[in-house]
Amino acid sequence: MNDASSLHLLSELPPIRRSRGGYLYTQNGERLLDLWLNNATILQGHQPAGLLTVAKNALAQTFIHPYPSHWHQRAIQAIQITFDAHAVHIAPHRALCMHEPWHHHPKGYYLLRAGIPLPKDCTIAQLALPLSGYACYLLIDKNAKNELPTAEILPAYLARTLLRMLTHLLNFTPEITPITSTNFSQHHAYFTYNQTSIDSHQALFRLALKEKILLPPSPQATGLWLPHLFSAGQNQTIKAILS
């Protein structure tokens, strides 16, 4: 995702001051409708009340450094039991190159997206959740054990927050508005670009940005449209952009 085109397009945004729900608020007072949501990993919108409280308490009551903690152990155990994984490793983000579950990966490495079953050939899955530079990898096929990245410790505040985010992933039941477009493909509540050329993608991105809508900044990135975060008029504008 961090290719030159995505970094270039993100640099065209004005500085972001804060985020809330489906919105990004810029330093110059503009409000952007966020349909990227950090590669479709922010499932409840920015700063959801319950998660924000957990994160604040976790920061106040634990620590930001990756020392061993019972929160790390609890998170690993909960994920392993929930998904019946042979092992769960925390590792740096992008330690493995993962594919979306609707795109075949020759080694069976897939993102575990809310509401979408893992492909039958999955060997290793990654929870599609924002973990501040870390990733959570699940060993689905025990024969792929040697392909897992070396396990690290998740800082206690992130492990505690991950437990709450896990409930968001498991209970994700969004309103889904059909997208009928030659430019985008829809997968449950997610969408991706059909046009893979840089020029076509950049044109779509900039057209949406003029309407104060943030689309995924890379042709390989995934977007997420959560209609309940926006007004009826804003959803009509979004539908027009995605159609």
Image: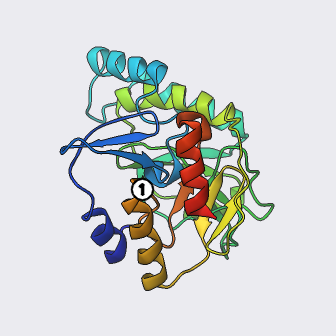
Q: Residues within 10 Å of mark 1 (few under 14, many from 20)?
A: many
Q: Is residue 98 left or right of residue 176?
A: left
Task: Let me know if residue 105 appears in the view.
Answer: yes
Say which quadrant the C terminus sits in: bottom right
Question: At 54% from the left edge and 56% from the top edge, which residue is drawn?
Answer: 223
Q: Is residue 242 left or right of residue 6?
A: right
Say which quadrant the N terminus sits in: bottom left
- Name the one closer to the observer, 84 or 36: 36
Vertical placement of residue 83 versus 95, above or below: above
Question: At 51% from the left edge and 44% from the top edge, which residue is drawn?
Answer: 129
- Dot 1 falls on a residue whose secondary structure is strand
- Residue 94 at x, y percent in the picture: 43, 61
**Hey, what amino acid is under mark 1?**
Leu
The color scheme shown is rainbow
Task: Let me know if residue 3 appears in the view.
Answer: no
Q: Is residue 78 left or right of residue 42?
A: right
Residue occupied by mark 1 = 214
- Residue 99 at x, y percent in the picture: 60, 66
- Residue 216 at x, y percent in the picture: 46, 61
- Residue 121 at x, y percent in the picture: 77, 65
